Image (cartoon, grey):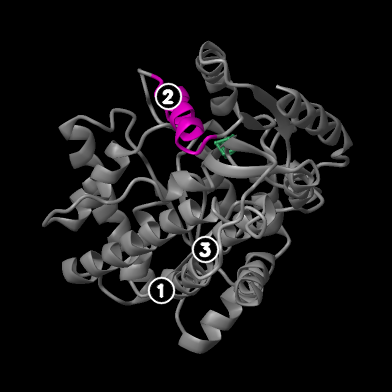
Amino acid sequence: MDRVKRILGQFENAAHHPGQMVREWKQETGRKVVGCLPVHSSGAEELIHAAGMLPVGLWGGQTTISRASEYLQAFCCSIMKAVMEFSLTGVYKDLDAYVSPNTCDTMRCIPLLLKETNPEVPVIGLVLPDNRKINVGVDYLAEEFKSIGESLSEISGQKITPDALQNSIAVFNQHKGLMNHFLTLANEHLDIITPYYRHMVIKSSFFMTKEKHSEWLSQLIDALEKTPSYPWSGKKVVVTGIMMEPDSILNMLADYNLAVVGDDLAQGSRQFRTPLPDGDDPYVRLAQRFADFEGCATVHDPVKLRGTIIKDLVTDNQADGVLVMMMKFCDPEEYDYPYIKMDLEDSNIPLLHVEIEQQMDSVEQVRTRLQAFAEMLRDK
Ligand code: SF4
């Protein structure tokens, strides 16, 4: 138990100190760091790794929004407001470049705003195809990744070879496998892997090398496997949405004896659940992963598979209900919600819709609703 706690403390420290993690890596290696905007930087991250640089996930954070209001309207999501605030106030000063996918309407303007406000730092736009499953969509994205790879090679001074990229894909695939293994094992230890620590393990992966994170994950998995399973007597939930922050909400779940046993979060399992397929052309492998990826509000999905994916998570993990963590002002998520609600209600799965922001003045309303939901599950 002590070993598990010590390893969890490492993940927690990394998740809370991204700037320090980045600076230490730069000092140790003398190499460059590229900030990757959400949600779809997968593919670019492997390219950054193959060019000898460190990809770092930029998912906003808790801050006071002041200067970002000059560039983004009040109705933009809190993640992008925080990203702009951090860019304008020097928090991102250690980044040597950005990769910015066109994930949603809000993010389409972010490359221009970053260039305007930080002209000395290169911004590489990643234009993802809407028709991602047809051959021309895959071919187009493979070419897009080649072009991004050339820009990254110029920034790092290290050419991306096919062998180097295949090696990077193997490193990332191994990491995805370990993350999935950990998330499955976590359900046998819901007393230690609380919603907060589950999130810490996931979040820290955005701020360090995948090799180092995999090493820590292997240690954690080994320690958990040597720890007796815990018979959880509270209720179990699956969470869906973009992310589950601030931390106070995660701690509230523990207060009401709710454990997270599965997630469909853009910042969570969606980053790990789709492995890259095998193949000789590494650029096609990167593009094919995006074609294979399912269940996200920000990708074209005419058959709306997300409700089914969440239902399967509930069934597979014997969950009692679903928490929909709705990021305020996230249009894609809001458009998806009626379909999810309908699918879950058709299957009699209890769900709670909670509106969140990274900069929340008060979480007490959320507390009241979570408490009522927990009581309802308990009385069922
Ligand atoms: S939270 Fe929604 S609106 Fe904001 S960047 Fe992500 S997908 Fe776009």
Sequence-first disc among 1 and 3: 3
Residue 321 placement, left or right of 305: right
Tell me the amino acid under the disc marked 1. Answer: Glu
Sequence-first disc among 2 and 3: 3
> In the rendered structure, which segment of residues is drawn in magenta?
304-318
Tell me the amino acid under the disc marked 2. Answer: Thr
x, y (%) of residue 42? Answer: 39, 52
In the picture, the disc for residue 211 is: 1
Tell me the amino acid under the disc marked 3. Answer: Ser
Q: Regarding ligand 1, which quadrant of the image does it lie in?
A: top right
- Element marked by disc 2: helix
x, y (%) of residue 123? Answer: 47, 56
Q: Mark 2 packing: few (<14 Cα in 10 Å), some, or many (20+)? A: some
x, y (%) of residue 175? Answer: 39, 63
| Real-space CA distance between mark 2 and mark 3, rounded to the nearest whole angstrom | 27 Å
Please tell me whether residue 317 belongs to the stretch shown in magenta.
yes
